[in-house]
Image (tube, rainbow, N blue to C red):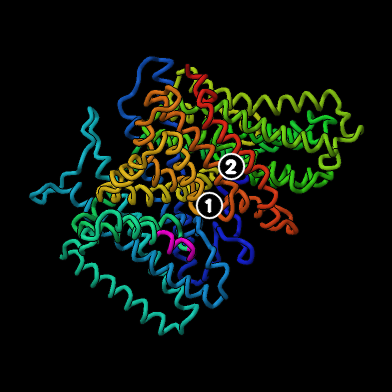
Amino acid sequence: MSSPVPEPAASSSSGSIGITPQRNEGVIRNVLDAWINRSGYVIGWLIFVAMVITFYEVILRYIFNAPTYWVHETTTFLVACIFALGGPIVLASDRHIRVRVVYDLVPAHVRHWLDVFNTIVTLIFAIGMTYAAYELFIRSAFNPVGDLQLERSGTSWNPPFPSLTKGVILVAVAIMTVQSVVHVAQALAAVLPRVAAGILVAAICAGALWAASELIGAGALGLRDIGIANGTYILIGAIFILLPTGMPLAFITGLVALAVTLGWFGASALTLVTSNAFGFITTYALVAVPMFVFMASLLDQSGIARDLFSAMRIFAGRLPGGVAVQTLVVAFFMAAMSGIIGGEIVLLGMLALPQMLRLGYDRNIGIGVVCAGGSLGTMVPPSIVLIIYGLQASAPITDLFVAALTPAVILMLSYMAYVLFRCIRNPSLGPPLSAEEAKIPAAERLRAAWAIIQPGAIAVIVLGSIYGGVASVTEAASMGVVATLAVIAMRGELSLVLLQRAVVQTLNTCGMIIWIGIGAAILVGVYNLMGGTRFVSAAILGMDASPIIIILLMMAILLVLGLFLDWIGIALLTLPIFVPIVVQLEIGGLDADQLRVWFGVLFAVNMQVSFLSPPFGPAAFYLKGVAPPEISLTDIFRALLPFIAIQICVLALLLSFPSLTMWILD
């Protein structure tokens, strides 16, 4: 893969979503950001250490029947540090998901002022988080009489990891505060004289400190008096007002949560914000995320995935649309190896799309196959979407993986059927290989078969250990990384440079994903304390509608949110509200546990729709970053419409026949 979550430059003229918007460069900012980015070369190796000790636990547990008592907590601590410190590293490299509808439409001078606004708002968020993290750390590091007494885990090993993790969170947000001050200064220097910019930055910092001191001594600001209904409208309205400005999605949700906490509960409750962040990043189920991302990064840095595509092309034969069909098969394989969405699109965009265009394929079919096939990672186990869903819905992740397999195959076969139907009716849309191209020597076919066996073995190790009950999802992820390293070594590609690139790529990817999750977790935690979950649940259950209508309403809400928000933000914002309602419904004779699994598959399909749907449609922007320059975002979104229709049809099929999802678990 080219990148598990790539960073294509967003086009200011044609895009509404961006990963790396234009930046105001400056010497101080460049030096600071470069220093922080270089620190990522060291921090990233924590991922490798976490993988090694997790695999060590697998060996001891399953071969020598001697499980450890320290690996679980150590791995969770290391990964929590990776997640927390990923924040300043992602801020330094400016790899954020942003909705840029307004940002891209306004003139350049207005964009400069939006940069100023966004950096100031980010600074406010960082200051608030630093204060909350400081209070949380002090409470965990000192006892009530003021003596140093680090909070411990309370297990038989009893390490001080809870307190140390809270200290790492404090360090991370403190660094982000310093970064934000520098970024504000640089943004102001682009629109004001240097002296005026410096004075204004000093005034902003002084004003922020004064406001903080005043708020710390004050109680709640009276927001609670307006009631939970109006509070909900304000919370949602604030998010959607800030979204189009180009501010990072992770900071929008976090800032709104901070503001609502101050207004509803007062400054004394701000530690709840960082408590939610701490609880999120120390969830053991999330340990699998960086390991699967690391595996995808290794596949990217090596030639395994590229050889897989080349090998599959050999077996495409002279079938009209054959190269497009084998591209979908490769996409399914790649999803089964890593569970990462996004990177597949970039890789297929670099390998498959030029090949199809060279062979004379219809451009719309080529674009659609690359984006839709690359999005199969939302469904194909070990999907990170399903891992996050299982974490939020308290659903068995193994059951989710098993249940999602049939719908994932249905989706892939539906894409294939569409391509074959069009290309067989009109072979000019997907010309078959010529007789000369179809002549492949036996030796080359054997090499191609070997190139397929290698990634196939990795997928079997990961999924076989999960489905066979041999290992947990996290342990299977570590086994997958070791298997990938073994294959890379066997190919003669293993090197320190390759590992370094892979760990840094993993750190950047996890930083972007997890900080969106942190912002959403903070917001959900605060909203729950406000009584928001009870309010929404009562409103939905009080509709006097049939269960299927309630599910359809939820699907509609998810589809609308998918037009603007990233999937992890949608998951953390909606699932704590939706899942408790779903398990109370009577649908298809399913019990509560089965309903959790069934709804999880529906959620994953819905998120696949959101991955293609304009104006957010991350798949389109990933492809745009590597597509030929003559292919515009408008061309990409137009090509995706038939595949979006297929996804919605499959979603309707799974809604109508829950047994399609659940039969394999019976």
Which label sits on residue 339? none
Q: Tell me residue 224's x, y (percent).
A: 22, 58
Q: Amino acid at mark 1?
A: Leu
Q: Taking the image as drawn, is residue 337 in sight? A: no
Which label sits on residue 563? 1
Q: Nearer the viewer, mark 2 or mark 1?
A: 1
Q: In the picture, residue 65 is in which quadrant?
A: top left
Residue found at the very far left of the displayed protein: 145
Who is closer to the viewer here, 650 or 238? 650
Rendered position, 361 above or below 326: below
User: Which residue is at 26% across, 48% downward?
Assistant: 531
Q: Tell me residue 400's x, y (percent).
A: 47, 28
Q: Secondary structure at mark 1?
A: loop
Membership of 550 in magenta stretch: no
Residue wearing tag 2? 498
User: Which residue is at 30% across, 61% downward?
Assistant: 259
Q: Amino acid at mark 2?
A: Leu
**Real-space Cα distance between discs 2 and 1?**
36 Å
Q: Tell me residue 473's x, y (percent).
A: 45, 28
Tell me how many marks there are: 2
The quadrant of the picture occupied by the N terminus is top right
Who is closer to the viewer here, 541 or 76? 541
User: Which residue is at 52% across, 67% downward?
Assistant: 102
Prevalent SS, magenta region: helix
Membership of 241 in magenta stretch: yes
User: Which residue is at 46% across, 61% downward?
Assistant: 243
Question: Which residues make up the magenta segment?
Answer: 238-246
Q: In the picture, residue 398 is in which quadrant?
A: top left
